[in-house]
Image (cartoon, helix red, strand yellow):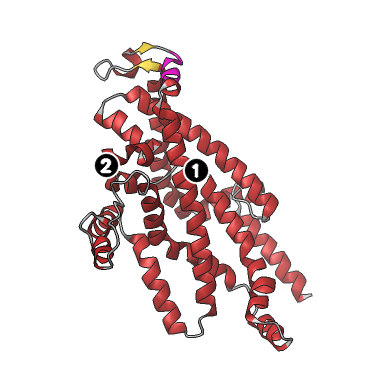
């Protein structure tokens, strides 16, 4: 009887908390008007910075003249798209962007998962919290700070090459060698973000019942067997889901990082779509080309995130929407 009363009360509360359903919608709006008021700044920001700028998509279809504006510029249709796809650097830009982004996604998630598993095995809570704070802290640094550190450590006369010289090893041009630079981008980003990635996996590991691990140990299961049979089945679906989310940004290779670290000597392997848009639009004032690349990037990103969401649902059972 008590269970039925609690269930009826829960249904009543939920019906009041859902505006727009039945006769309680007006009362709900009056009761929760502060929540609607809190949504107002977000709605205004969405309109001003996300919806209104969509008008600028038209720049991709005109011979844009900043003096005449978008409405006064001559219509050229798909000419700008054809020009972008005919440019020899387009394939190179896409290749660089995909390879760098893919390397960041995969290595960062593997590093985050591995670090979370290592922390999970630590039996000293104080040391575990200390290690987690230290590795998570770089996530909150801007790339201007991290880039300055990278220049000091990885430059031609930096600390790393100084160590190599003391060991009799040749210097490595981390920021000037086009063959090395993509790896510098990937691993510097992994260093910055792997601690933050581990937070998600640590949260998933809290779902494991410690008594289950103790029972497995009593039955003779070693640490490797417990990891393989109990721990990994819990975190692998989360890993698949996080990789799928990352695949939605397969054309986002890290604009700020590349802008801070790259130079003309490594354009052939370090230039990505975002930095190309920056140079074309804000440096060379070719707004049409920059807009076309931005549109293509948005369309491909949308298709990638929809595909990744479907794949994640099939493989792990987790979906973003």
Q: Between residues 2 and 119, which one lies in front from this camera angle?
A: 119
Q: Quadrant of residue 155?
A: bottom left
Q: Where is residue 152 drawn, in percent x and y?
A: 22, 59
> What is the magenta segment's predominant secondary structure?
helix
Name the foreground residue: 95 vs 214.
Answer: 95
Vertical relation: 106 (above or below) 49: below
Q: Is residue 75 left or right of residue 116?
A: left
- At 32% from the left and 41% from the top, the residue drawn is 266
Q: Which residue corresponds to mark 1?
A: 250
Q: Which mark is residue 217?
A: none
- Specify the segment rendered in magenta: 77-83
Instruction: Say which residue label 2 marks.
Output: 263
Which mark is first along the chain, 2 or 1? 1
Q: Is residue 209 visible?
A: yes
Q: Quadrant of the N terminus?
A: bottom right
Left or right relative to 226: residue 114: left
Task: Tell whether 77 sits left or right of 276.
Answer: right
Residue at the far bottom in the pictured view? 218
């Amino acid at each position: 009887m008590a269970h039925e009363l609690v269930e009826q009360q829960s249904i009543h509360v939920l019906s009041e908390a859902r505006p727009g359903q039945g006769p309680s919608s007006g009362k709900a709006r009056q009761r929760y008007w502060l929540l609607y008021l809190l949504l107002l700044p977000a709605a205004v920001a969405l309109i001003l910075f996300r919806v209104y700028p969509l008008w600028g998509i038209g720049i991709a279809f005109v011979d844009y003249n900043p003096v005449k504006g978008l409405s006064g510029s001559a219509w050229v249709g798909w000419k700008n798209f054809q020009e972008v796809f005919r440019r020899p650097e387009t394939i190179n830009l896409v290749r660089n962007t995909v390879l760098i982004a893919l390397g960041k996604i995969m290595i960062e998630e593997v590093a985050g998962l591995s670090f979370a598993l290592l922390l999970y095995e630590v039996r000293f809570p104080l040391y575990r919290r200390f290690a987690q704070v230290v590795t998570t802290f770089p996530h909150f640094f801007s790339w201007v700070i991290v880039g300055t550190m990278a220049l000091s450590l990885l430059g031609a006369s930096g600390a790393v090459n100084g160590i190599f010289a003391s060991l009799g090893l040749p210097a490595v041009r981390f920021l000037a060698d086009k063959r090395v630079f993509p790896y510098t981008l990937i691993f510097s980003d992994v260093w910055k973000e792997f601690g933050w990635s581990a937070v998600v996996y640590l949260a998933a590991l809290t779902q494991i019942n410690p008594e289950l691990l103790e029972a497995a140990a009593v039955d003779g299961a070693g640490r490797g067997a417990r990891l393989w049979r109990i721990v990994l089945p819990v975190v692998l679906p989360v890993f698949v889901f996080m990789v799928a989310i990352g695949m939605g940004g397969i054309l986002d290779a890290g604009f700020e990082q590349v802008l801070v670290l790259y130079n003309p000597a490594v354009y052939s392997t370090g230039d990505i779509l975002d930095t190309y848009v920056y140079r074309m639009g804000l440096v060379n004032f070719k707004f049409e080309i920059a807009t076309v690349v931005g549109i293509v990037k948005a369309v491909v990103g949308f298709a990638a995130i929809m595909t990744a969401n479907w794949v994640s649902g099939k493989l792990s059972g987790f979906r973003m929407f």
